[in-house]
């Protein structure tokens, strides 16, 4: 009741609301059922096709949009980086189905891995069934630096010097923003 009229409730900004255990416990579904009464401006961000289970509820929201997060199209690399997430193709298919059901959708191209993320191909593949596209660069911070560079060493070692440069200099991101 304390939500202001112009506020947005975002479910899934840090933790995916449709993790595999959601199929059993239906916590996100319960939240959606409760939120229906208030009709907030609602946004859901996920990587999972399980969101389709809740279409009956989603269609009852007057101001809703659902986003799918996707940063790497390559199935093999995606599986290595996000072993428990849905495949890139399943995520794109989920967007298409949501759109066909009349849900406002967006593709959240995130994180953008330099020289790995093919954002142009992602745009091409999804442009017919998304209402908006959002982009987020890879943020190489202390807490994820080790994992990112291990991933590169195992999969794209030639990119390590580029990533080391990007970590110190934002000009790569500035030029990419212009290109996008």
Image: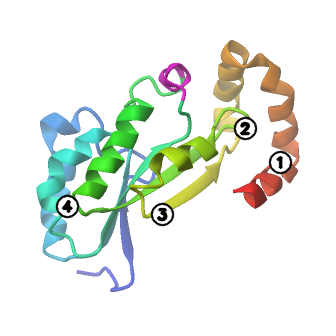
How far across and down, in percent of the image, does residue 129 sit? Answer: 38, 55
Q: In the depicted view, which residue is nearer to us: 30 or 116?
A: 116
Viewer-side residue, 121 vs 2: 121
Q: Do the residues under discs 1 and 2 have CB atoms within 8 angstroms?
A: yes
Q: Closer to the N terminus: mark 4 or mark 3?
A: 4
**Picture quarter with the N terminus:** bottom left
Which label sits on residue 114?
Answer: 2
Give the image quarter of residue 88.
top left
Q: What element does badge 4 sit on?
A: helix
**In the rendered view, does 149 fall on the left or right side of 16?**
right
Q: Which type of secondary structure does the marked residue at label 2 adopt?
A: loop
Question: What residue is drawn where x is 71% and y is 40%?
Answer: 140
Query: Of callouts 3 and 2, which one flags the residue occurring earlier in the amino acid sequence?
Result: 2
**Residue 17 at x, y percent in the picture:** 31, 47
Q: Few, some or many C-alpha atoms within 10 Å of disc 4 (few <14, some 14-19, many ≥20)?
A: many
Does 45 sit left or right of 28 as displayed? Answer: right
Q: Which residue is mark 4?
A: 58
């Amino acid at each position: 009741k304390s939500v202001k009229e112009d506020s947005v409730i975002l479910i899934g900004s840090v933790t995916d609301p449709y993790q595999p255990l959601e199929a059993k416990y239906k916590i996100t579904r319960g939240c959606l059922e409760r939120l229906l009464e208030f009709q907030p401006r609602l946004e859901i961000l996920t990587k999972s096709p399980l969101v389709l289970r809740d279409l009956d509820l989603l269609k009852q929201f007057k101001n809703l949009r659902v986003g799918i997060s996707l940063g790497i199209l390559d199935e093999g690399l995606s599986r290595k980086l996000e072993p428990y997430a849905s495949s890139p193709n399943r995520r794109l298919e989920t967007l298409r189905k949501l759109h066909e059901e009349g849900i406002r959708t967006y593709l959240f191209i995130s994180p953008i891995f330099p020289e790995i993320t093919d954002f142009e191909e992602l745009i091409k593949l999804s442009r017919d069934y998304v209402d908006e596209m959002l982009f987020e660069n890879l943020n190489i911070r202390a807490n994820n630096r080790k994992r990112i560079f291990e991933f590169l060493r195992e999969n794209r070692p030639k990119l390590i010097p580029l990533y080391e440069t990007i970590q110190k200099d934002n000009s790569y991101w500035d030029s990419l923003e212009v290109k996008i």
